[in-house]
Image (spheres, rainbow, N blue to C red):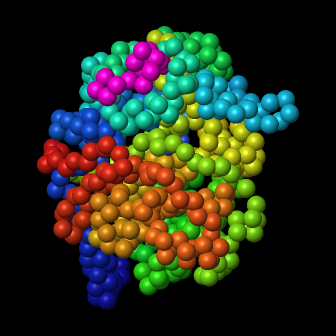
Amino acid sequence: MKHPSPAIYQRLRYGAFLLCACLLVSTSLLAARPPVAAVASAHPLATRAGMDILASGGNAFDAAVAVSAALAVVEPYSSGLGGGGFWLLHRARDAHEVMVDGRERAPLAATRDMYLDADGDVVPGLSVDGALAAGIPGVPAALVHISRRYGRLPLQQNLAPAIQLAREGFEVDGVYRRMAQFRLAPLQDDMAAADIFLQDDEVPDAGHRIVQADLAATLESIARFGDNGFYRGTLARKLVQGVRAAGGIWSLQDLAQYRVVERKPLRGEYRGMRITSAAPPSSGGVALIAMLNMLSAYELDSLDTATRTHVVIESMRRAYRDRAGYLGDSDFVEVPLERLTSMAHARALGQSIELDRATPSSALPGNTTEPEGEDTTHFSIIDADGNRVAATLSINYPFGACVVPPGTGVLLNDEMDDFSAKPGEPNVYGLVGAEANAIEPGKRPLSSMSPTFVESEQGVAIIGTPGGSRIITMVLLGILDLADGNGTDSWVSLPRFHHQYLPDSVQFEPGAFDEALQQQLRERGHTLKPLDSSYGNMQAIYWDKQTGKVTPASDPRGVGDARVGLIRLK
Ligand code: DON
């Protein structure tokens, strides 16, 4: 037998050295841990639930279940067991990343024209108020799935804080009162909802306790029986009965068939940072990556403020045009994801951006009203092993459909309004859609929820917010602020602006544009729409891998709470 030559030995040794070095580098990257855990959520009681679960030995995924369930109790206008959401997970041990899609599905009896009258016109309110507006909820299935597949603690333990909050009640605050005032009429229309969420049929006083005994029992049923505790058996029968009595179309089969879907998150890159965000049926990742791709053609920090703002607006306009035209549930329609998130597409879209003038949306190939509502919820979590969760959950409009099937405590969502009831007709957020987002039985409505991770050599950001159609542009502005070197406090508080293709106007928060900037934008041809109030409720965390510092932050526009804790996983 021929012996290998010394040169081959040398190459083999060099190869082995390289392999070891790679293994060492990758294990040290995987092993990198933050020194603390952190939770940022829209409600102090939910943040506390998450921190308590972490302190009891739970990981970020257990804490995510506890926070989601607690928010379902204490923020009933934003999310709940009757709603849906997207949980973006990163498991530190093997860098596994997944989006748990617990989005609502259209009932099997849903039809394309279910919200139209005999003349083919959209019936106002039908997809927003009342049981017909409700999709089949995904939150309970997602909680069971995340806890069992990714958590370390038993589901019962993860749901315990929420059960206690539902049973003992929580105090009404200013946000609750504002939301209840906004949805007072539809809440008064449903006896069970009014009993739980109003006080003598009116907006409750500050400090009034909202006790939800039925919801506590429903959570207990899920804790004991998992999916079956919600989607089958006694509770499922009560849900279907209540929905049908209120004019809805759910069936037992709808509930029994509901499944969460694990989806591959969307990936993009911006200035050396890796972006990981929501996949369809959310439009968030696609639009976010498309905007960042377009913006990477510019040295944003060397542009004057007016030009920078202008190109950011123009990138929003173009990405939202794609949203309106192409996006829908990718299990039902072909969504050209690769193309829409490619640099080539961004270059093609970006070619029509002129630095000195706005492109009218009507000049772009391919059509909306005023977005409203400050509802839905987002939270961010990191544990001391580096596991992380970004989750945005919703029942859509404040207090969803404002209907509670009697005996369940479950407030129904009105997520069916996120479908395009009629091509080209705006929904409650002024968004228009096309065939891709038309109603079909079992289909998931297109969402804007954009839970996102941003990662670079320097650190890791976990970011997201509620805000309907404006979610994606809020996350974009947060990422651009991160790229500018600013910290979480700045991302969550900076004044915001938004363009969504149609209507062709730039909305901006009080204080976002000074007089001079407004003048410069008008001169370029932008129609400005100053808003009377602020929007969004961003919850973010940044882990600086170089310094080890973990900084959570909660949007000052809300009443949320961001905490760090010295919690080590065993
Ligand atoms: O999934 C969506 O895009 C909407 N249902 C989210 C609604 C929302 O953020 C309400 N907050 N203003």
Image coordinates for residue 222, horizontal then vertical, percent: 39, 21
507 left or right of 151? right
Camera-side residue: 431 or 283?
A: 431
The N terminus lies in which quarter of the figure? bottom left
Can you name the residue that lies furthest to the front here?
515
Q: Magenta residues, as a range?
A: 193-208
Q: Is residue 206 magenta?
A: yes
Indicate the position of residue 124 as horizontal and vertical percent values: 70, 33
426 in magenta: no
User: Is residue 533 in view from this perspective?
Assistant: yes
Residue at the (61%, 16%) spot, across then down? 246
Q: Is residue 220 visible?
A: no
Give me the residue at 19% from left, 62% from top.
549
Magenta stretch, overall SS: loop
| Vertical order, 57 against 12 (above or below) | above
Instruction: Indicate the quadrant where residue 343 lies.
Output: bottom right
Task: Say which of 292 and 16 sits in front.
Answer: 292
Q: Is residue 217 above or below residue 366?
A: above
Residue 282, position in %: x, y? 56, 49
Q: What residue is drawn where x is 29% and y is 81%?
A: 14
